[in-house]
Amino acid sequence: MNCSRPTKIAQILPIFNSFIYPSRGVEKIGFLNLWARSRKGLSAVSVKKMGWSLENPDGDVETKKVSVSPATEDYGQEAIEAIRAGKVIAVPTDTLYGFACDACSAEAVNRIYEIKGRKHTSPLAICVGDVHDIKHYAVTDHLPLGLLDCLLPGPVTLVLRRGESSILEKSLNPGLESIGVRVPDCNFIRVIARGSRSALALTSANLSGQPSSIDIKDFENLWEHCAYVYDGGILPAGRAGSTVVDLTKLGKYKILRPGSAKEETVAILERHSLLEDGTGA
């Protein structure tokens, strides 16, 4: 079924278009103007080194430098190289700030769990650069024609079956046959995903169980654990996060988390003739 008006969740939610440059094309990174307005005193073309005062076991105070840069295309290659090197970075998305790393690096994924203090039984989602990349990591051939392009890019996490053909490492979310997939309506993280030539493991930038972050200051106590922190300003979507929907069953959907776009997501799903899965399974 083809998309009818509106075609994408990001177009339905004007708040995203008001603050984030449209995701078509990668020539411009839309956080630049927002970042510049909300971060007075930081140059959009320079990196500010922020000092951390840390006490070592001997009682001496050390200063750790943490690189905080604007989430613009000027720093895209730097972020890509960090991901390829197995590092963890902090990035804005179209919903919340997140920690990202190479989903195929077991060491980097473990590092994210350590930073968040998160149990390894809690799965991580992945982020890819474009909708057509999803098929490399999850099963999509059971979905109605055009559905993915109507939902994504946007503030939605799709839970799909991995399938035997998935190129994801088995060490990511071991024992689970499904995977949450995101294509955020945010050029910066999509440029990183494309350039890394891998899926990104992506989770919210906060300690496990603590409020999600819409400003880099919200997780300032965790900066030291990241190779780089990228500042996209105060994100306008609130702390609800993405809407999480299970699409593992043919012709069915189940909302696992309402998030910031439940109504718009459900409208698109039902327009494509999917029925809500009312079972408890």
Image (cartoon, rainbow, N blue to C red):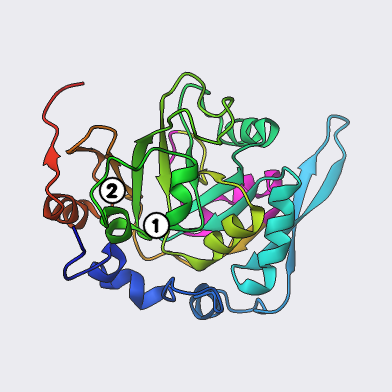
Residue nearer the viewer, 195 or 37: 195
The quadrant holding residue 51 is: bottom right
Disc assigned to residue 95: 1
Q: Is residue 129 above or below residue 174?
A: below
Residue extending farthest to the top is: 175
Q: Counting other residues with Cα less than 10 Å from the Cα at mark 2, is it few (<14), some (14-19), or many (20 or more)?
A: many
In percent of width and height, residue 82 lies at 73, 52
Which residue corresponds to the image point at 41% horizontal and 25% vertical from the top-left? 177
In percent of width and height, residue 185 lies at 41, 63
Taking the magenta stretch, the answer to whether it contains residue 157 is no
Q: Rounded to the nearest whole Å, what is the CA distance between mark 1 and mark 2?
A: 9 Å
First in sequence, mark 1 or 2: give its number: 1
Quarter of the figure with the N terminus: bottom left
> At label 2, which amino acid type do we have?
Gly
Disc assigned to residue 259: 2
- Element marked by disc 2: loop
Q: Is residue 180 above or below residue 152?
A: above
Disc assigned to residue 212: none
Q: Is residue 40 above or below residue 137?
A: below
Q: Are marks 1 and 2 in contact (CB under 8 Å)?
A: yes
- Element marked by disc 1: loop
From the viewer's perspective, tell me whether residue 93 is left or right of residue 152: right
Residue nearer the viewer, 279 or 229: 279
Quarter of the figure with the C terminus: top left
**Start-end of magenta stretch:** 209-228
Q: Counting other residues with Cα less than 10 Å from the Cα at mark 1, is it few (<14), some (14-19), or many (20 or more)?
A: many
Which residue corresponds to the image point at 85% horizontal and 34% vertical from the top-left? 59
